[in-house]
Image (tube, helix red, strand yellow):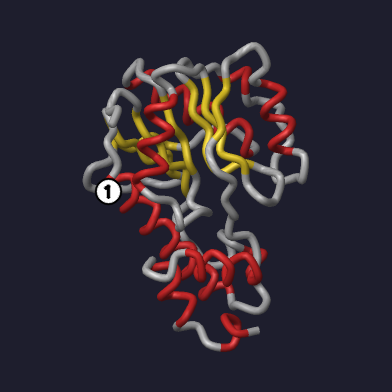
Amino acid sequence: MSNRAQIVVLAKRPRPGRVKTRLTPPYTPSEAAELAAGALADTLAAVRAAPAAARVLAFDDDADVPGFDLVRQRGAGLDERLAWAFHDAYALRPLPVVLVGMDTPQLTPALLARAAETLDGHDAVFGPATDGGFWLLGLRRPDPARLVGVPMSRPDTGRAQLGRLRGLSVAFLPCLTDVDDAASARLVAGLAPGTRFAATLAGLGAGAAG
């Protein structure tokens, strides 16, 4: 397994009304924040278990997370936050960067290792999401111009992002489902029943069955 890449997690502090707002209804803002916290915990656990040269949390708040360096998010839209997370991690260590969010708690250390290994022989690695976006992006040499201006949270986001990678050798990972709404939350929990996310969802009652 390659450990020459660093893994970055782009995440928000799970605050009610600020995260997973598409889960409400059927869940309350506090319940949606609990689910987000579970997803983030699962993501961090997967990253800790994956081989990596370094692990970085690109966060929207101050935090002290064992095993992770912290960089503060900057930029206006998600495209800019992604671009600067790549840039700032690379500024810390000029090593390939694999970046994930906190929306795929079914993520495994094996998938992360595969992404890192892929950057040994490719310029980029791309993990498409079923909603048309992407759950992972890896770049051997990050460049903000590859991300800034890409329209986010749309059915064509993945296609637009791939357009920005034109001229690079790009490898692909399996398509995963992001947790966006109640239906996708139930689907992901079913795919990864041993996760904290799945346990949190199971404990929330009506929304989990509705």
User: How many marks are shown on the rendered structure?
Assistant: 1
Three-letter amino acid code at the position of disc 1? Val
Return the residue nearer the eye: 28 or 97: 97
Determine whether the residue tagged by mark 1 lies in a helix, strand or loop: loop
Q: Position of residue 117 (x, y in %)?
A: 38, 27
Q: Residue at x 37, y 69 (%)?
A: 194
Residue position for label 1: 65
Q: Eyeballing the image, is 131 above or below 160?
A: below
Q: Quadrant of residue 180?
A: bottom right
Q: Tell whether 129 sits left or right of 94.
A: right
Residue 86: percent from left, percent from top: 47, 26
Q: Position of residue 152 (x, y in %)?
A: 70, 40
Q: Is residue 65 left or right of residue 32?
A: left
Please tell me which residue lies in front, 44 or 165: 165
Q: Is residue 103 above or below residue 110?
A: below
* Image quarter of residue 1: top left
Q: Residue at x 67, y 43 (%)?
A: 133
- Compared across the picture, whether 81 is left or right of 167 comes to left
Give the residue drawn at x 73%, y 33%. 159
Q: Foreground: 37 or 161? A: 161
- Position of residue 19 relative to residue 72, above or below, is below
Of the 4 image quadrants, the one containing the C terminus is bottom right
Counting from the top left corner in percent of width and height, residue 7 is at: 37, 34
Q: Crowding at label 1, few (<14), some or many (≥20) Cα neighbours within 10 Å?
A: few
